[in-house]
Amino acid sequence: MAPEAEIAVVIYDYIRKEYLLSAVRSIAAQTLPRDRFELVVSKNFDDPLIDRELERSGAITIHDEDPRFTRCWHRAINASRAPIVTFLDDDDEYEPDRLERILETMREKPDVGYYRNRVRTIDGGGQPIPPERWRSAEQDKELDALGPLYIAPEDKTRLLELARRRNRIWPSFNVGTIAIRRELLDGELGRIYEDIRLTMDMFLFVAGVLSPRAMYVDNRRLTRYRYAPKARYRLFSGNSHRTISQLGDVMEDYRMLSALAARHGRSDLAKWLSRESEYSERLFRDATLLEQVTAGAERSEVTRLSKEYLRFLLQTSPDRAFRPDVWKTWAYAFAYLCAPTTTRRFAEVRFGSGGPF
């Protein structure tokens, strides 16, 4: 490590390798001099071409077989020493001046502990996707009018309110947009880090809100976010068992973070995270029930899951119990109880034999 290093870049790559060199090259192309940043790459595979380029780039390389990627992120962070840490998913890229802009912001505003910038969206081949096709999290429309946001320690409730508005900002979207001071990950946060399953970006955001430092949401688009079926694993694609398991993991992450926020006296953040947990649980229960119909489960099991799902909705969001998206699930469950063979065949045609999503 160069003694002058001011910021560490951490990349994590599990199995997927086709975009990793593009990510590393975008870091090598930074306008910030190389001796001012560290590069740590955690991966679970060996590849001669990739390994040679990582060696040329001066990266610290960690071979980590742990499938829980938050634990891999944590170990990679611990392998670096710079006072500021930023991140990059293996299929995303940086704009050439991203690191320089982060350090510039934190130098001008030394009380800032959490930084986040906006994204530009690219396709699988690295070509720009037109902005009109971007999803709301990629657009961050509110920042078009507000410009960059400096959030003082006593004003963090405002950021949570902006994150709930219709044309909301997304202050925790995508780990590759986030930079954080290392000190914010000490103490209790550092101890629970490895218990987080999937929501690395939300964990870092919560660390920023709970810290005594200010936060900064940059309106510049300094991260290239790759949106392509082969590049990004989505909750509603791929193997349904893994998908449903991940929905459950997200639900538990939000519960854990909500409890953490409550212990730190941030009831506003705790309520926000609790709502996110309830939303994830609704998706989890919905997907589990549909999966059991598709798999031809015992009718007693479908009945049990239906009752539990209805009880959950009536306790948390009774208005949703009568929404069309929920009644779709009830319709499949009721039809299955009456005519299991026919309903299962119809569900397989609709969802595929691998499950509902």
Image (spheres, rainbow, N blue to C red):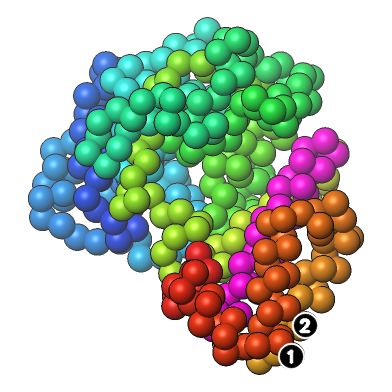
User: Where does the image place residue 1, in percent across and percent down from the top left?
Assistant: 30, 34
Which residue is drawn at the image coordinates 48% and 39% (left, top)? 175
Q: Amino acid at mark 1?
A: Ser
Say whether residue 140 is left or right of residue 24.
Answer: right
Label 2 environment density (alpha carbons within 10 Å; few <14, some 14–19, many ≥20):
few
| Disc 1: CA contacts within 10 A as few (<14), some (14-19) or many (>=20) | few
Prevalent SS, magenta region = helix
Compared to residue 117, the image places residue 232 above or below, namely: below
The answer to whether residue 297 is above or below residue 355 is: below
Q: Is residue 103 in view?
A: no
Quadrant assignment, res 334? bottom right
Query: Depth check: 177 or 214 in front?
Result: 177
Q: Could you tell me residue 119's position as x and y percent?
A: 43, 27
Return the x and y of residue 6 as percentages of the image width and height: 40, 24
Residue at the disc numbered 1: 300
Q: Which residues are magenta?
A: 266-295
Whether residue 282 is in magenta: the answer is yes
On the picture, is 221 further left or further right than 310? left
Which quarter of the figure has residue 301? bottom right
| Marks 1 and 2 close (CB-CB < 8 Å) | yes
Residue farthest toward the top in the current orientation of the protein: 108
Q: Residue at x 71, y 48 (%)?
A: 276
> Alpha carbon of mark 1 to alpha carbon of mark 2: how far?
6 Å
227 vs 156, left or right, is left
Q: Is residue 221 left or right of residue 247?
A: left
Confirm whether the magenta stretch covers residue 324.
Answer: no
**Vertical placement of 45 versus 184: above or below?**
below
* Callout 2 amino acid: Arg
Which residue is under mark 2?
A: 304
Residue drawn 50% across and 73% down? 355
